[in-house]
């Protein structure tokens, strides 16, 4: 990607948020409502509260839980997906269970996880892990199953062992779909990170938002929401940039084939 | 099959080949013995190949021609070991083919699907060597030789999808030749490129076949192509396939596009084959 195109990419990403923030700024400028303070107040409070006091005490632990749960889910999801791809009968047997757990909203399992793991970090990491696991697992399996027959013939021609076939052919072929699953998982993970802190925690950004609301520190509540939105967006942008880099071959070859 | 087994077998193969070329010369590289293929069962059953037998000697260039949808691809998949026959068998260097033998390579028609878009040209070509654990430097050197032989020098660091169709098929051919196979099986390799490119690729494959001393079996529905390339032609009937005739091509080598195609022999052979195929 050349420099001007990169700028264009970032611009196409940012114009709507900028527009909405401007609207929020103007609309709330003269607000006297306790529940909707002016954006300028929220921003100055955000600077005061989150650089760096609450960032260290609340945001960092939250992101730490998210990171551990997410990375574990990606590793286990791809690993388990590969196993189910290899052993078709196991996949058939696992199918109803996987889909049952996939459609079950992860927050519904929070009470169970609280009983099983207590209220500490383990519980939060576990619930993030569980919510992130399914999109990665199902996309891995789907992507692997969709591997081009002719590429599998090539694998046969080269007499690849199962592990070689996985590493050299199937995993790269499925990687665009695995990435799509990882992106969905990231969104799920952020949701569960916040929800778990709201239900059972004494730290974290979710806890901060709920506590602020309950103690009528409404401006503080808004700063928490704002920080969460910014962090979520940054994580997503970072993910997309990383994906574009790693899967450059996929995006460019698709473009090329469409142009032909 | 474990990695170790694959490797040791490969070593043995290479050794026997080096030590006793004379003993192997008598055994046909490829034999088709009464191959029959039926898809499905009972009332749904469809016979794609009825009864096909022929032999290919070492160093020969054999074309298999037949009408479209005539079970040619099925036959090639059986010959290569990608698919079992319902009856009969394929033999490679005297041994029954059960999986794709180490010394056999296949070039598929659809290069855009057979190449790996996530690998650069040189890495695609190196793949068979990488699988055989050839050391990195040696791998690069041998890949470079075949890349140059197929006329791809300068495109090593590009991705397949950045190349034209003809160039992509060259990559697929280079990949098939990288580990110096004894037999190259090609399934309509030039069917999806334009006429000019096809002539270039035909001449390239004839050159490469001499340079690497490889036996070639090429499937095509194009009679002109078969006559131009082949030493011998296996003419198949409409589906279900049987061998209609085995034709020896009397044209002199090396072939040359304009001169060979103007040869009266070429014209009469072409007419004869046309009659056989459309009968």
Image (cartoon, helix red, strand yellow):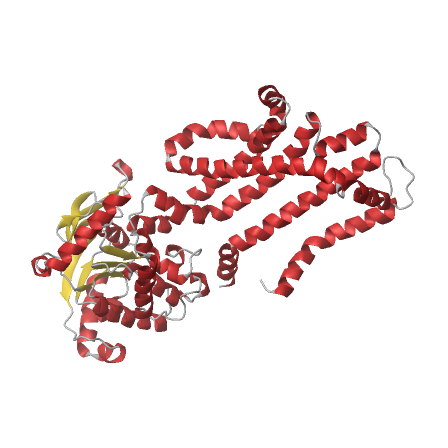
Q: Residue at x 82, y 45 (%)?
A: A43
Task: Residue B119: name its quadrant.
Answer: bottom left
Depth order, front residue of A135/B52: A135
Q: Is residue B190 visible?
A: no
Q: Position of residue B235 (x, y in %)?
A: 19, 60
Q: Is residue A44 visible?
A: yes
Residue sitting farthest toward the top: A115
Depth order, front residue of B170/A163: A163
Q: Position of residue B96 (x, y in %)?
A: 16, 47
Q: Position of residue B158 (x, y in %)?
A: 44, 64
In the rendered view, does B216 fall on the left or right side of A260?
left
**Quarter of the image where the N terminus of chain B is located:** top left
Q: Residue at x 33, y 49 (%)?
A: A155
Depth order, front residue of A24/A145: A24
In the rendered view, does B19 fall on the left or right side of B9?
left
Q: Position of residue A183 (x, y in %)?
A: 58, 43
Q: Residue at x 70, y 30 (%)?
A: A203
């Amino acid at each position: 990607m050349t420099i001007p195109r990169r700028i264009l990419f970032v611009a196409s990403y940012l114009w709507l948020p900028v527009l909405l923030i401007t609207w929020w700024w103007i609309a709330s400028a003269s607000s006297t409502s306790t529940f909707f303070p002016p954006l300028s107040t929220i921003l100055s409070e955000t600077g005061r509260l989150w650089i760096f006091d609450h960032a260290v005490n609340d945001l960092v632990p939250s992101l730490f839980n998210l990171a551990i749960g997410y990375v574990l889910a990606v590793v286990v999801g791809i690993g388990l997906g590969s196993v189910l791809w290899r052993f078709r009968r196991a996949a058939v047997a696992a199918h109803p269970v996987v889909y049952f757990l996939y459609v079950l909203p992860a927050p519904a399992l929070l009470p169970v996880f609280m009983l099983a793991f207590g209220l500490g970090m383990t519980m939060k990491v576990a619930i993030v892990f569980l919510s992130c696991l399914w999109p990665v697992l199902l996309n891995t399996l789907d992507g692997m199953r969709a591997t081009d027959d002719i590429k599998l013939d090539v694998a046969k021609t080269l007499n690849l062992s199962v592990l070689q076939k996985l590493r050299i052919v199937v995993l790269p072929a499925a990687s665009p779909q695995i990435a799509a699953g990882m992106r969905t998982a990231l969104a799920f993970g952020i949701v569960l990170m916040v929800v778990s802190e709201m239900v059972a925690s004494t730290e974290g950004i979710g806890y901060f938002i709920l506590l602020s609301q309950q103690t009528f520190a409404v401006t503080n509540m808004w700063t928490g929401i704002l920080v969460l939105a910014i962090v979520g967006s940054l994580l997503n942008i970072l993910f997309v940039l990383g994906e574009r880099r790693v899967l450059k071959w996929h995006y460019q070859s698709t473009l090329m084939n469409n142009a032909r | 099959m474990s990695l170790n087994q694959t490797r040791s077998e490969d070593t043995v193969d290479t050794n026997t080949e080096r030590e006793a070329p004379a003993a192997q010369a008598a055994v046909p590289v490829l034999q088709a013995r009464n191959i029959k293929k039926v898809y499905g069962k009972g009332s749904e059953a469809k016979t794609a190949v009825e009864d096909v037998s022929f032999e290919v000697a070492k160093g020969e260039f054999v074309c298999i021609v037949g009408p479209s949808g005539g079970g040619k691809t099925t036959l090639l998949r059986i010959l290569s070991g990608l698919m079992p026959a319902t009856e009969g068998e394929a033999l490679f260097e005297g041994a029954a083919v059960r999986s794709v033998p180490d010394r056999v390579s296949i070039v598929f028609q659809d290069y855009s699907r057979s190449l790996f878009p996530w690998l650069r040209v040189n890495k695609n070509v190196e793949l068979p060597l990488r699988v055989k654990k050839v050391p990195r430097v040696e791998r690069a050197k041998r890949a470079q030789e075949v890349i140059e032989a197929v006329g791809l020098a300068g495109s090593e660091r590009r991705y397949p999808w950045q190349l034209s169709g003809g160039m992509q098929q060259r990559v697929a051919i280079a990949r098939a030749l990288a580990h110096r196979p004894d037999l190259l099986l090609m399934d309509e390799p030039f069917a999806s490129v334009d006429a000019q490119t096809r002539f270039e690729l035909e001449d390239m494959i004839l050159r490469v076949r001499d340079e690497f001393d490889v036996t070639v079996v090429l499937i095509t529905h194009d009679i002109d192509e078969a006559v131009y390339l082949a030493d011998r032609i296996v003419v198949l009937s409409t589906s279900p396939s049987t061998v209609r005739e085995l034709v020896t091509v009397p044209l002199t080598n090396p072939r040359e596009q304009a001169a060979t195609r103007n040869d009266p022999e070429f014209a009469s052979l072409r007419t004869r084959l046309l009659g056989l195929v459309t009968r």
